[in-house]
Amino acid sequence: MKNKLKILLVEDSVSFAQGMELLLLQHPKIEKVLHTINYEATLDALKINSIDIIILDLNFETKQFDGFMIAKKVKQQYPAIKIMILTQHTRKHHYNRLLNECNIDAYLDKQLGIEETYAAIGTVMKGQHYIDKNISEMLDIEHWMQASMREQEVIVQLMKGLTQKEIADKLFISPKTVEVHIRNLFHKFNVKNTTELVSKYIRYKNANRENIDESTSPFKSLG
Amino acid sequence: MKNKLKILLVEDSVSFAQGMELLLLQHPKIEKVLHTINYEATLDALKINSIDIIILDLNFETKQFDGFMIAKKVKQQYPAIKIMILTQHTRKHHYNRLLNECNIDAYLDKQLGIEETYAAIGTVMKGQHYIDKNISEMLDIEHWMQASMREQEVIVQLMKGLTQKEIADKLFISPKTVEVHIRNLFHKFNVKNTTELVSKYIRYKNANRENIDESTSPFKSLG
DNA sequence: ATATCAATAAGGGTTTTTCCTTAATTTTCT
DNA sequence: AGAAAATTAAGGAAAAACCCTTATTGATAT
């Protein structure tokens, strides 16, 4: 990595992109940061600029901004450009599609700090893939998505230290039913007891950090 | 809060301060960000500048940079200035000393995002105290510091879902001893069973985020 | 419409955890 | 050196967790 890097940030949240740009430019190896917000602008930018890395924010909510399409098209036209995915909502099928169909180079959790991004850039420029720890961990226990509502209610009570009997009283069901829910959770998530269950659950929850999720942009009002 | 805010950042890690400065200046209500790295420079800066808020990074490791002294002195000389503490290693006695002796206005976890800082600034400028959620949670279970080495080893195995017998075999001690360690932990941390124990433990560990702790600065090399 | 899945529940049995007490040895701190 | 805390361990008993099987109801999906 002798030359300085030129990065294109594809991100539909302008304020987030601005903060990101400032942080990226802090790094001595990063020379230039461009910013586009959609498919057309991205391809236009690539025509007139030489870009090393695209950092692509996958926002699956909006339809007019399809990260998959951008990733695929760019990799076809410019195979040398590294594509790094930034996301908040990881799903296993997204992950598989991006890695296999689109040949992306890195997969990062948006909630993580800039240091994670720097590390990913280093790895990717060496020609290796970089999958962020939280995301790979999350994928392992992606079964959480398969947990039913009732099952999740039970886990929440387990974390508080309630017994099966106490949970039954709280949810107005039989202790035997609570037992079934717990046993089903054991099988779904391949754990041996409630201790391991909540252990995995909390680590997953934390990898997802849903409490911070509300604020896509770090720039809120001061009230 | 009609006027724009002038902030003084007291921080011994220059790179961290620079990133922080950029982020703070992103906010429309923040006009100016100064930066000092020690006691004398801070008092000098206060003599020639009108400052609204001091964001003070408490680094308890180094002795030449005593956050307590700065906080106390500033509050004596300039009672109108709000002091916000940024820290990575929260301890209950630090917290008490800062709030009671030094009259600081906010207490924040360094690992958290800029949005937390913005929220804290808003609260503090209204004259209220702001104690970040992670920190208050951490203080509640600050007893973790009282857990012995052996007890912590046992918790780690509990999280993996091992039974008392299995833990005993792993640590080459009697199951009865494992039982004693677990029972002692119950009393120390005021929980009812292992499930609640590991639940609290992981949440504490995560509030502390020791895995990210190594890197004080977000600006690492690209390798 | 019919198969699949979520949620409910029970009987009966084994294993594990949890609580109570008591106590010896080692380590650590003052 | 002496006190305090950590680590070790046991016997006995109650409570809870865990495993297996079977079964009904309601919702949802192909």
Image (cartoon, coloured by chain):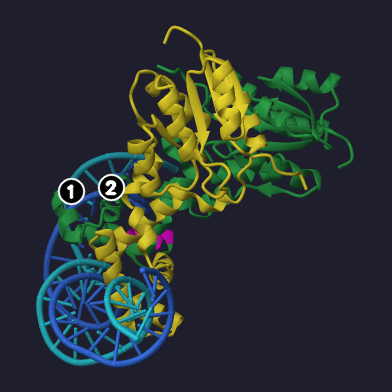
Chain colours: A green, B yellow, C blue, D cyan
Give the percent coordinates (x, y) of residue D30: 44, 43
- Considering the image in quadrants, where does the N terminus of chain A appear? top right
Badge 1 amino acid: Leu
Kindly check if marks 1 and 2 are in contact, taking CB atoms under 8 A apart as contact. yes
Residue under disc 1 on the same chain as residue under disc 2: yes
Front-lying residue, A184 or B8: B8
In the rendered structure, the answer to whether residue A151 lies left or right of residue B87 reads left
Give the percent coordinates (x, y) of residue B53: 48, 22
User: Which residue occupies 54% across, 13% down?
Assistant: B28
Residue A77 visible at all: yes
> Earlier along the polypeptide chain: callout 1 or callout 2?
2
Residue of label 2: A153
Residue A72 within the segment the image draws in magenta: no
User: Which residue occupies 35% across, 81% down?
Assistant: B165
Front-lying residue, A112 or B103: B103
Give the percent coordinates (x, y) of residue D21: 26, 72
CA distance separating discs 1 and 2? 9 Å
Front-lying residue, B143 or A77: B143
User: Which residue occupies 45% across, 31% down?
Assistant: B73
Image label count? 2
What is the crowding at mark 2: few (fewer than 14 residues within 10 Å), some, or many (at least 20)? some
Residue of label 1: A171
Magenta-highlighted stretch: main secondary structure?
helix
- Please tell me the numbered disc located at residue B185: none
Front-lying residue, B143 or B46: B46
Indicate the secondary structure of the residue bearing disc 1: helix
Question: What is the span of residues highlighted in magenta in the rendered image?
Answer: A183-189
Chain for mark 2? A
Badge 2 amino acid: Glu
